[in-house]
Image (cartoon, rainbow, N blue to C red):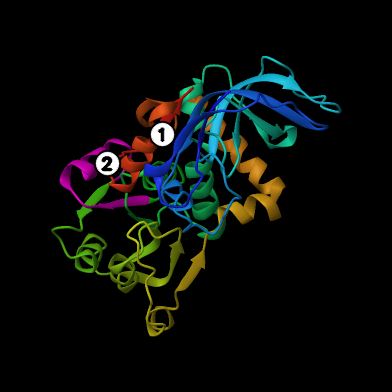
Amino acid sequence: MKAVLCSELSGPAALTFADLPAPEPGPGEVVVDVAYAALNFFDTLITAGRYQTKPALPFSPGGEMSGVVAKVGPGVADVRPGDRVAAYLGYGACREQVVVRAEALTPVPDGLPLHKAAGIIITYGTTLHALADRGDLKPGETLAVLGASGGVGLAAVEIGALLGARVIACASSADKLAFARERGAHDGIDYAREDLKTRLKELTDGRGVDVVYDPVGGEATEAAVRALAWRGRLLVIGFAAGDIPKLPLNLPMLKGADVRGVFWGAHTEKEPEAHRAELARIFAWAAEGAISAHVDAVLPLSETADAIGRIARREVRGKILVRT
């Protein structure tokens, strides 16, 4: 079995390609032939030892995947060889076969290609939990999405529009904004050329935005918070800019605003029933074509390091996958 291994925490350039023994399922487990592994921003961090999850070395990157069930272990009743499935693993998907707990698998609906299913769970799962649960986004409210053309940003544009919000896409170039508009954004702000706070205020006639979806961090966070409406909500998703902002606490105080953390990984563990309901909703949307599950590129498994490098350089729109 071929596998991509991280044996030292020095970033994706140090990843190696190795042969490992084929796995066998234990009680309650399933072996899946991986068709596609999806990569995310946190793969740039986990391979450098800078992510909150720190697997024992060596490990494989790749937090999610899709494929076909190859074997089932004792006690598995509802999953059969040949079933098309997807799963969130946290890490370890960049190999030809993976062992997964049966209850962690999500069936892939008929008509949804496996390459589309591979990258849905983390970005859309994070986003639906963020907007509907943590953000309490309501129809008619205004949603500003920072980093709107990346994986989670694009998901926020699409789900925000599905939930009935007016979506303002915020990104670093005109072509990225055009891409976000194609996926449902109503307005756009190029924060490499325009003042983010000023433009958010202008686009809302001075009222401010109700919800800010922020996977970027850095200086954009404070500017967006300064443009929040009364009782607005800042959703803290991540820090793709590299800097964790230090927010002046008088800003949420004066606006009656909330700063709400979104830790989707913990949500899946602590609130599994809600997580399963969210996944069912997301996969139904994907099968109907209501969300794009956009795949920017598919590379061979042996080019996993290059795929992660593209994410680090912000060259990816939507998701990037590796195929086995």
Q: In this view, does 278 lie above or below 20?
A: below
Residue 9 pos. (x, y %) = 47, 52
Q: Which amino acid does label 2 sit on?
A: Glu
List the residue tagged with mark 1. Answer: 304
Q: Which of marks 1 and 2 is nearer the N terminus?
A: 1
Q: Which contiguous range is marked in magenta?
A: 166-185
Front in this rendered view, residue 96 or 198: 96
Residue 6 at what x, y percent from top left? 50, 43
Residue 268 is inside the magenta segment: no
To which residue does mark 2 refer? 315
Mark 1 Cα shell of 10 Å, populated few (<14), some (14-19), many (≥20): many
Q: Quadrant of residue 213?
A: bottom left
The CA distance from mark 1 to mark 2 is: 15 Å
Give the label on residue 313, or none.
none
Left or right position of 65 against 211: right
Q: Position of residue 218 (x, y in %)?
A: 32, 66
In percent of the image, x 27 and y 62: which residue is there? 204
